[in-house]
């Protein structure tokens, strides 16, 4: 379903969000104070406008309150990003996601009402570390402090065994959400579905249990 997004701040982070949302078929309004940055985004957005993110009148004039979801991607200038977040919430944008540069910035953003705070370098660093930690990990997503989803490559240890035989939930307290084989994804694996060599298993569980499964079970 087509949604309406605003991206404010078109640096590396903001511009990649803008391009990707637009590519996904959504309506995206791109805003930056730099005319050059705005020009670069014209063909990757539905509307592109030069405006100061802390000027409430300009934001209102651009009709930001008609959008359901905004991303504030002004990382370096903490004051600007905090003020812009505050205004977007005041104006009534239901969802405001904001990029933070550090924990202090994150705490302030949460206080002024940001719905989600992202520290891209931090989050990416954690994911990359998990890839480096194990050559079985294909991808990694944190659900909370304790729970995660990991994609793991199946070794010959699991080859040609069914999920029932492997009994992963009982042995490791992990749930197999999906099995990927080449381009195919089995999103509702049944107990008698077999695992093949090099399948990717999408597993959810407590991080300690996932680690145990990764080290001993797969
Ligand atoms: P990244 O690290 O993702 O490249 P930056 O923090 O370098 O992000 O980029 C921030 C972007 O926000 C820049 O394009 C900059 O022009 C824009 N920006 C900074 N201050 C304002 C402001 N007051 N109003 C609108 N855009 C701003």
Image (cartoon, rainbow, N blue to C red):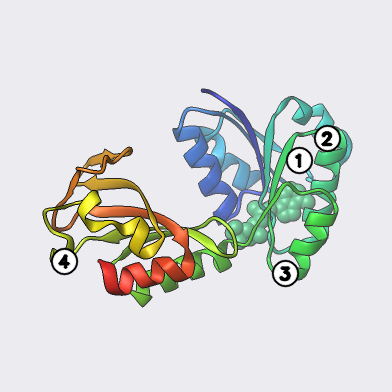
Q: CA distance from mark 4 to mark 1?
A: 58 Å
Tag 2 near tag 3, CB within 8 Å = no
Instruction: Answer with mark 2 or mark 3, whichever residue precedes in sequence.
Output: 2
Secondary element at image label 3: helix
Which residue was labeled with disc 4?
A: 157
Q: Residues within 10 Å of mark 4 (few under 14, many from 20)?
A: some
The residue positioned 23% from the left and 57% from the top of the image is: 166
Which x, y percent locates residue 179? 27, 47
Closer mark to the observer between disc 4 and disc 1: 4
The residue positioned 70% from the left and 69% from the top of the image is: 102
Q: Residues within 10 Å of mark 2 (few under 14, many from 20)?
A: some
Find out if the beta carbon at label 4 lies less than 8 Å from the nearest ligand 1 atom. Answer: no
Which residue was labeled with disc 3?
A: 103
Disc tally is 4
Quadrant hosting residue 96: top right
Quadrant hosting residue 157: bottom left
Quarter of the image with the C terminus in it: bottom left
Q: CA distance from mark 4 to mark 3?
A: 42 Å
Tag 1 near tag 2, CB within 8 Å = yes
Which x, y percent locates residue 201? 29, 54
Which residue was labeled with disc 1?
A: 51
Instruction: Answer with mark 1 or mark 2, whichever residue precedes in sequence.
Output: 1
């Amino acid at each position: 379903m087509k949604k309406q997004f605003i991206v404010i701040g078109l640096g590396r982070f903001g511009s990649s969000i803008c391009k990707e949302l637009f590519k996904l078929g959504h309506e995206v309004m791109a805003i930056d104070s730099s005319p050059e940055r705005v020009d670069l985004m014209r063909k990757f957005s539905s509307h592109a406008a030069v405006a100061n993110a802390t000027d409430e009148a300009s934001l209102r004039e651009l009709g930001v309150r008609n959008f359901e979801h905004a991303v504030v991607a002004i990382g370096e200038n903490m004051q600007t990003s905090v003020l812009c977040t505050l205004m977007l919430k005041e104006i009534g944008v239901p969802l405001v996601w904001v990029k933070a540069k550090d924990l202090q910035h994150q705490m302030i953003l949460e206080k002024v009402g940001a719905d989600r705070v992202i520290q891209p370098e931090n989050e990416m660093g954690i994911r990359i570390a998990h890839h480096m930690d194990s050559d079985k990990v294909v991808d990694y997503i944190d659900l909370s402090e304790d729970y995660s989803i990991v994609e793991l490559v199946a070794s010959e240890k699991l080859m040609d065994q069914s999920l029932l035989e492997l009994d992963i939930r009982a042995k490791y307290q992990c749930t197999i959400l999906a099995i990927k084989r080449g381009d195919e994804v089995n999103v509702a694996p049944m107990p008698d579905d077999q695992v093949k060599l090099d399948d990717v298993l999408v597993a959810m569980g407590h991080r300690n249990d996932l680690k145990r499964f990764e080290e001993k079970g797969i």
